[in-house]
Amino acid sequence: MTEMMKGNEAIAEAAVRAGVRFYAGYPITPSSEIMEYLSWRLPQEGGSFIQSESELAGINMVIGAAASGVRALTASSGPGISLMQEGISTLSDEGLSAVVITQVRYGNGLGTLISAQCDYNRETRGGGHGDYRCIVLCPASVQEFVDLTLTAYELAEKYRVVTVMMGEATLGQMMEPVTLPDFVEPKRLPWALNGHYTYKKVGIFQRDSRKEAVELVEKYNRIKENEQRWEEESLQDSDYVFISYGVPGRSTLGAVRALRAQGEKVGIIRPITAWPFPEKAFYHINPKVKGIITVEANATGQLVDDAALYTKKALKERNVPVYDMACVFGTPTLQSIEEEYFKIKAGERKEVY
C-alpha cells in the first residue's frame, strides 16, 4: 500500500523492516526524525535505541553492536558525520558491517541547514585515517532511499564493509508517496562475537598488515567490478552528457527530457553508487560526444573530478571537455539547468577539464 510519508520517517521504517535492531546516535538537523521515529519503533520490534551523549559515543556503540552480529544503524549530518570518521575507520579495519546515513547539509564547520551535496569527497574517499573504502549509495527519491535500505545491509554484510547512505536534507524533510517493503527476519551474522570465544582473538602485534592490505585491495576490486549501480538515458547519440546524482540528478533527468523534446541531443548518467563510481556507464557514451556536464549542489565542484577521470578512461583517444554546474544552495531547477546548458553550448562557459 502506498502512503504519504516524510522522508526521514519512511527511511527509519524501512530500516526496521530491513532487520535493524540497534540504533545509537545524537540528534542533528536534518536527520533527527530518523532517531525520533526509531526511539519508539525499535522497542516495538524487540530492538534497542540509545540516544548517545555524542556522535563519537554513537558510532562506538555501533561498533559493539556490529561486532555482535546485529544490524546496526546510526544517522547524522555534516559535523556529526565528521566526528564519526575514526569509528567508521575502525569498523572498516575490523571488517564489521554497518550502515551510516548522512543527510547532507551545506557548509564548513557547523555549516547551515540548507540541503547540499558538499560532502561528496569525504564520503567517496573515506573521511577517516587509513586505507579503506565505504560503499556509498546516493538515492534520488524517498522511495529509492527506502528500496536501497535492505540493499545497503546486504552489501555491507557481503563484503564486511560500512555502507554509507548519502542523502540530502531535501530527502529527509520532503514528503512523497512511499510503498514500504516487507519485513526481513533479522539473523545474527555467523562470524559475530557470541560470548564463548569461538573465534580466536588476534592482537594488533599478531596481525599481518601486509597480507591484510593485499586482501583489502582484492576486496575493493571485487566491489568495483560487481557493485556499480546507475541510471542512464539517451547516451548513444548525445552531443552532451549530464552527470548528476541524488535530488539534483532527478532534476537533471527532467531537464534532459525537456531538452530532448526541443531537439537537443543530450543524455544523462545518474550514479546510484557514488562509490564504486559507475565508470562502466561511461563506455556507453557516444564516442563523438562534445562535452560532459556535471550538475551538483556544492560550491567547489566535487563530482566533476570523477566525471573527468572516467571520461578520460572511457574516451582516452579524445580530450573531451568537462563542465561543471556547481549550484551552492538547494536543488537546481530544470530551468536553471537548461539555461546553463545553452550557455555551455554557445561557448560562454569555460570547461573545468
Image (cartoon, rainbow, N blue to C red):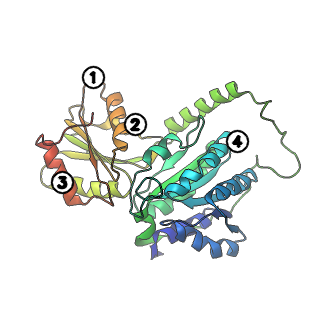
The tag earlier along the polypeptide, 4 or 3, is: 4
Q: Secondary structure at mark 1?
A: loop
Q: What's the residue at 32%, 35% (across, down)?
A: 308
Q: Nearer the viewer, residue 342 or 146?
A: 342
Residue 39 placement, left or right of 123: right
Structural distance between the alpha carbons of marks 4 and 2: 28 Å
Which of labels 4 and 2 is toward the front? 4
Residue 331 location (% of width, % of height):
32, 60
Q: Which amino acid, by three-letter code, is at mark 2?
A: Glu
Q: Nearer the viewer, residue 67 or 122?
A: 122
- Determine which of the numbered discs, if any, sits on residue 279 in the image: 2
The tag earlier along the polypeptide, 4 or 1, is: 4
Residue 58 in sight in this render:
yes
The tag earlier along the polypeptide, 2 or 3, is: 2
Which of labels 3 and 1 is toward the front? 3
Which of labels 2 and 3 is toward the front? 3
Quarter-of-image position of residue 238:
top left
Disc 2 and disc 3 in contact, CB within 8 angstroms: no
Q: Secondary structure at mark 3?
A: helix
The tag earlier along the polypeptide, 4 or 2, is: 4
Within 10 Å of disc 1 (Cα), the crowding (few <14, some 14-19, many 20+) is few
Q: Which residue is mark 1?
A: 317
Q: Secondary structure at mark 4?
A: helix
